[in-house]
């Protein structure tokens, strides 16, 4: 099944293809010649996820899904949250975001955090929402080079001796916020086609 993923983030596209498996061909807006920077004006993951799915569906006339996700750190009152991509700068500067996060936390021992993901699947204009959460904590320094974004400083509770960036793609996808949300979406689509 061909399905449009309303994202400009190549890490998300790669992970969605891995998680959804060979039964799906994940197509990006860029593959369709769309390079628009969609303004995320919502204040929740759900609102921003819907904004992105509706924008790309309107532009292409196709059903699609979007993912809004981010890192919520308890000691920072839930920040960076919906601002995760642009925490340090206006662009998606992962290195600067990590540097700012580690600086904000300093030597604070309270490092509990979680990744959250809300996927919106738009089918014939009707939104369906799927969510995932990955609990963990923030490391004191970076480790690993897999994944993307904050992965080098996120230690998942399920693998307490390594960061997400040190896991194989399969191991990350098995526990990740995105893995959970997209497997729910995949199950919903299979049910619907039965
Ligand atoms: P699109 O809006 O085009 O999908 P984006 O990267 O701007 O791409 P978001 O607005 O949802 O997406 O921001 C998500 C940010 O949260 C992302 O840029 C990372 O900084 C972080 N993030 C989300 N999932 C992550 C993951 O699995 N590993 C590490 N960081 C992640």
Image (cartoon, rainbow, N blue to C red):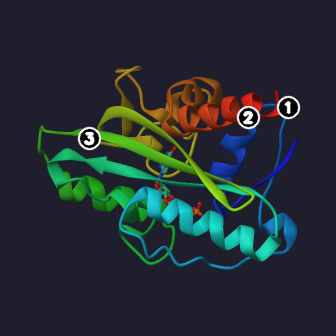
Q: CA distance from mark 1 to mark 3?
A: 38 Å
| Residue 137 visible to an observer of this rendering | yes
The crowd level at tag 1 (other Cα within 10 Å; few <14, some 14-19, many 20+) is few
Front: mark 1 or 3: 1
The crowd level at tag 2 (other Cα within 10 Å; few <14, some 14-19, many 20+) is some
In the rendered image, which quarter is residue 4 located in?
A: bottom right
- Work out whether mark 1 precedes mark 3 in sequence or the reverse, and give the earlier one: 1
| Residue 106 visible to an observer of this rendering | no
- The tag on residue 20 is 2
In the rendered view, tell whether residue 81 sits above or below residue 154: below
Badge 3 is on which residue?
Answer: 140
From the top left corner, tell me how far across and down residue 11 is, in percent: 64, 50
Taking the spot 64% from the left edge, 68% from the top edge, the residue there is 54
Badge 1 is on which residue?
Answer: 22
Instruction: Say whether marks 1 and 2 touch (CB < 8 Å).
Output: no
Q: Is mark 3 within 8 Å of ligand 1?
A: no
């Amino acid at each position: 099944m061909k399905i449009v993923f309303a994202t400009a983030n190549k890490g998300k596209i790669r992970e969605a293809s891995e998680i959804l498996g060979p039964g799906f061909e994940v197509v990006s807006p860029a593959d369709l010649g769309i390079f628009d920077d969609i303004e995320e004006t919502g204040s929740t993951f759900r609102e921003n996820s819907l904004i992105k799915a509706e924008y790309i569906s309107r532009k292409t006339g196709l059903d699609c899904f979007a993912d809004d996700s981010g890192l919520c750190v308890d000691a920072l009152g839930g920040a960076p949250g919906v601002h995760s991509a642009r925490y340090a700068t206006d662009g998606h500067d992962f290195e600067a975001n990590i540097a700012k996060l580690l600086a904000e936390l300093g030597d604070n021992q309270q490092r509990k955090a979680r990744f959250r993901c809300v996927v919106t699947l738009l089918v014939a204009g009707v939104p369906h929402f799927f969510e995932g959460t990955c609990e963990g904590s923030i490391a004191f320094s970076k480790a690993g080079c897999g994944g993307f974004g904050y992965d080098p400083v996120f230690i998942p509770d399920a693998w307490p001796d390594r960061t997400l960036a040190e896991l194989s793609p399969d191991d990350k996808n098995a526990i990740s916020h995105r893995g959970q949300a997209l497997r729910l979406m995949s199950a919903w689509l299979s049910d619907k086609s039965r």
